[in-house]
Amino acid sequence: MQPKRVALVTGSGAKRVGSVVAGALARRGYAIAVHYRTSAAEASDTVAALRSAGGEAAAFPADLTDERAVRAMVRDVLGHFGRIDALVNCAAVWKPKPLEEVTAADVRFHFDTNALGTFLTCQQVGLAMAQQPEGGAIVNIGDWAEVRPYPGYAAYFPSKGAVTATTRCLAVELALRNPRVRVNAILPGPVMLPPDLPEAEKQQAINATLVKREGSPSNIAQAVLSFLDNDFVTGACLPVDGGRTVYAPE
Ligand SMILES: NC(=O)c1ccc[n+]([C@@H]2O[C@H](COP(=O)([O-])OP(=O)(O)OC[C@H]3O[C@@H](n4cnc5c(N)ncnc54)[C@H](OP(=O)(O)O)[C@@H]3O)[C@@H](O)[C@H]2O)c1
């Protein structure tokens, strides 16, 4: 009998994009490692919901800016489930600040989670996948606006630029160790804006799409499933953004 496939989804404790991705993977039959940092109560709710829908799930805490914590999380997931077939990196931070006020600490804060955290999870999980005869697939989550940044987020965008570079780099490194390991990225547009985002900023984000609406986390989950299914795609970065990348409104 085939062993049950296992997916680790970072940032899937809180009811944000990661938890929707986790739900979609569970419905596909994956056992889910729910990763969280501070959202412990929400993570245990997410695990309970996945289990009550008939799935297998467990929660794993880690601050992804801490190399030892990432190593421990990956070791614990492998100890619990025995393997990792899919990694989806949804954890991130995103804070606005005018360029004049941006400090080195602001840039480091974004790099530590978005760039380093993504790198470390890809490295640790990817190397474990390379040891599995079946390999595995990693999907990182970047941001469409890395290529055409909007103002006010100068401390954030460089860290998201590192996500696409990491995706291409790890696609090469890991495939050379096991050609059945693939690494891709999704670059979302507005799919789940923060509840405290000012209404004017929200409307602006919607008007700047070609489809004239906010997307949904399930649009991201669909793209994740497609990357996991299609074993001829690696090193690719796909905008899922309602046309935001190609449209530059006056
Ligand atoms: N939402 C959108 O419309 C949108 C648009 C463009 C790109 N994206 C990208 O899509 C992904 C998912 O978006 P989202 O809105 O769901 O993200 P989010 O709510 O901003 O963050 C998801 C989770 O990341 C975790 N996290 C933050 N810092 C961490 C750290 N140092 N270590 C471990 N975990 C950490 C938090 O977990 P805890 O709560 O457990 O602390 C948080 O709940 C992100 O990469 C985001 O940049 C989203």
Image (cartoon, grey):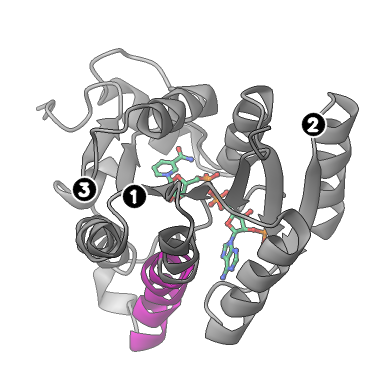
Any magenta on residue 120?
yes
User: Mark 3 falls on what kind of element?
Assistant: loop
Question: What residue does disc 2 label?
Answer: 55
Q: Nearer the viewer, residue 112 or 130?
A: 130
Crowding at label 3, few (<14), some or many (≥20) Cα neighbours within 10 Å?
A: some
Q: Residue at x 30, y 62 (%)?
A: 174
Q: Amino acid at mark 3?
A: Gly
Q: Residue at x 86, y 34 (%)?
A: 51
| Whether the residue under disc 1 has CB within 8 Å of ligand 1 | yes
Any magenta on residue 95?
no
Residue 234 in which image quadrant: top left
Which disc, if any, is residue 235? 3
Q: Can residue 21 be seen from the camera position used here?
A: yes
Give the alpha-carbon distance from disc 1 to disc 2, as whole Å.
Answer: 28 Å
Crowding at label 1, few (<14), some or many (≥20) Cα neighbours within 10 Å?
A: many
Question: Can you tell which of label 1 and label 3 is closer to the viewer?
Answer: 3
Give the alpha-carbon distance from disc 2 to disc 3, as whole Å.
Answer: 30 Å
